[in-house]
Amino acid sequence: MARDLHRTIDAVWRIESARIIGALARRVRDVGLAEELAQDALVAALEHWPKDGIPDNPGAWLMATAKNRALDRLRQATLHHQKQQELGADADARGDHVVPDFSDSLDDADDIGDDLLRLVFTACHPVLSREAKVALTLKLLVGMSTPEIARAFLQPETTIAQRIVRAKRTLGDARVPFEVPRGDALRDRLSAVLEVVYLIFNEGYSATAGDDLMRPALCDEALRLGRILAQLSPDTAEVHGLVALMEIQASRLRARQAADGKPILLMAQDRGRWDRLLIGRGLAALARAEQLAGDIGPYQLQAAIAACHARAGTPGETDWHRIVDLYGELMLSTPSPVVELNRAVAVSMASGPAAALLLVDGLVTDGHLARYHLLHAARGDFLARLDRLEEARIEFERAAAMTANEREKALLLDRAREVRAR
Amino acid sequence: MRVMVIVKANENSEAGVMPDPELFVAMGKYNEELVKAGILLAADGLHPSSRGARVHFSGTARTVTDGPFAETKELVAGFWLWEVRSMEEAIEWVRRCPNPHVGDSDIEIRPVFSPEDFAAIVPEQVAAQVAEQDARLRDQIASKA
């Protein structure tokens, strides 16, 4: 059976595009231009391969074609420059030297990893908005097309297209160098990259039954990006921490929704449906992070919490005291009312609902999460377990009124009815 | 999608002929590429079937046979588990694999079942089972808290 050629070309493109763009960007010093050149090569492949067949080494074919386009453009630019000189500008031979060494260094295998790192740091550069970083990362590193990104993010295609064009222009205008940041800057820049990867993962994780399949696929893409980064930057604990967190969360993907699409809470999930392979990979990544010295970052801490759940064969075996401690550490490194709320839930499991109620009452007084439905859902849960059923019902109904997510709303109203019936 | 990529056995692999160092290095490099691409989840090579055993099922009867087994080309010599975007991507990666054996070889790619594949057959049973488990676990949690 002949396989669909366009699907094959698409597969080759997804495998090769990032390294082609990276190698070109290193030479032309312009990520936007590099991406255009690579696209030119893709267009050429779509034109030639159906007639001539797929080359034995399709990646090398694409790279060579893109390289030739780049040389054409550089020659044109040089000619243009020379013409300007002939027209009376001063004799500055700038530009000529760009061409000769171009072809020699483009295929150096050792540079591929460095190019990819440079590319990811450029796509996640601080001059860009968060949305722009996400779109550019999916475009340049993952090789997704603009329509695919639009479908995955439930946005009109024109919005995403404009976002990408503007992002490339912003990078050009700011003269962002194509490089891996060094020294003190590296840490902040890396955490921006990890943030983008985790944003992509969470966008996929929030997909529900009936959504376009491109949405859940974002989880796979983020995981793949994370694994690639872990290879490129093996001595950075937080990269392994993020990979561990994503692997363990992804292990629960198929257990977190009932057949009718209703979310199943962590404690109620069928642990037999958890993906043991991903759990194993997640725990291994966490172990790698823990072996590396230095401060323990927020991803590693969250991964350690996720690991506590992953290691427990039944909900009753969960090490809640350890989870309380880990949330306490997370409060020190990245304090937020949401982390405190999670700590309260863990405290309710470790020491009972009365202690936890004190903590959430503190959050209620504090007021930051006044409109956050999960605060009221948790408070309702603690009250119900203390047999304060009427107060619990009010909290569940309040929480239900606060969420726009229909399935969550249904779940909360179920709980309100449940306590009323008790 | 997850795929199992199955390296089929051949006469040499079944005879326990170890690959020469060159192939060993090439295969190591290939595996490294798979890891760098972020698609490799698991991989292992298998001893020849002479060290294996087979259990035959016929109704309630079970018959155990020790290896080696005859149908060499149908036997498995090793496998990878990959997370890829499509069958086409898996095929592209397999095309890049060095010939895994001395002599001719076959590598087979098989998509792994995902929960969605079962959704059409057992939605109600699963839903009922989940609901039941749900109730049981809640009781369990309540009694521990």
Image (spheres, coloured by chain):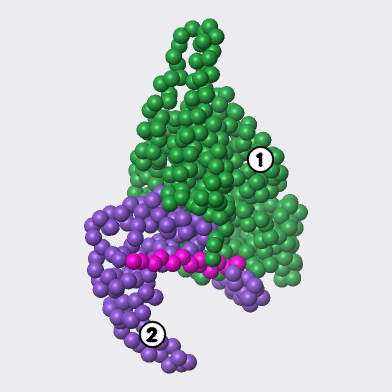
Chain colours: A green, B purple
Rendering coords of residue A37 (x, y %): 53, 35
| Residue A174 location (% of width, % of height) | 55, 24
- Quick check: can you spot residue B137? yes
Residue A114: x percent and y percent?
40, 37
Residue type indicated by callout 2: Val
Q: Which mark is residue A307?
A: none
- Residue most toward the front? A51
- Chain part drawn in magenta: B104-116
In percent of width and height, residue A132 lies at: 60, 36
Q: Please, what is the three-letter code of the amino acid marked with disc 1? A: Ile
Element on which disc 1 rests? helix
Read off the residue under disc 2: B55
In which quarter of the view is residue A107 placed?
top left
Instruction: Say if the magenta span includes residue B20.
Output: no
User: Callout 2: residue from which chain?
Assistant: B
Q: Residues within 10 Å of mark 1 (few under 14, many from 20)?
A: many
| Element type where label 2 sits in the image | strand
Given the image, what chain letter belongs to the residue carrying mark 1?
Answer: A
Q: Residue at left 46%, top 19%?
A: A95
- The residue at which mark 1 appears reads as A160
